[in-house]
Image (cartoon, helix red, strand yellow):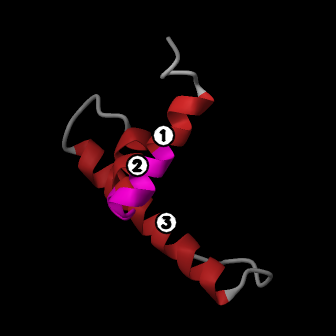
């Protein structure tokens, strides 16, 4: 994979890791017909986060979409 020279080493590493994550998501989804590849990808991304990061994101998502309003 050819990456733009304008990316930092950290950004290049992230892009390569993300591409590997997408490939893994496609492999997993291919074993389960009808599975959303994007959903598998999001699960793989969330598994890399700490529980605190996942909770923070969930709370932010709830506020953003008003899910906790009564």
Would you name the residue on which mark 2 appears? 55
Residue 9's place in the image compared with 2, above or below, is below
Question: Residue 50: horizontal and vertical position, in percent?
Answer: 36, 64
Let me know if residue 53 is in the magenta part: yes
Along the horizontal axis of the image, is 7 left or right of 61? right
Front position in the image: 51 or 23: 51
The answer to whether residue 14 is visible is yes
Distance from the alpha carbon under mark 1 to that under mark 2: 6 Å
Which element is circle 1 on? Answer: helix
* Residue for point 57% across, 71% down: 15
**Closer-to-camera residue (55/22):** 55
Which residue: 80% across, 81% down? 6
SS for callout 2: helix
Cβ atoms at labels 1 and 2 below 8 Å apart? yes
Which one is closest to the eye, mark 3 or mark 2?
2
Q: Position of residue 14 (x, y in %)?
A: 55, 74
Please tell me which residue is depicted at 48% across the width and 50% down the height of the picture: 56
The numbered mark at residue 59 is 1
In contact (CB < 8 Å): disc 3 and disc 2? no
Q: Are marks 3 and 1 in contact (CB under 8 Å)?
A: no
Region in magenta:
47-57
State the residue position of label 3.
18
Q: Residues within 10 Å of mark 2 (few under 14, many from 20)?
A: few
């Amino acid at each position: 994979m050819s990456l733009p020279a304008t990316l930092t080493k950290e950004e290049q590493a992230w892009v390569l890791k993300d591409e590997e994550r997408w490939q893994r998501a496609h492999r997993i989804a291919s074993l389960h017909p009808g599975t959303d590849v994007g959903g598998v990808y999001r699960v793989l991304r969330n598994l890399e986060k700490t529980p605190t990061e996942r909770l923070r994101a969930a709370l932010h998502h709830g506020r953003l979409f008003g899910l906790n309003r009564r």
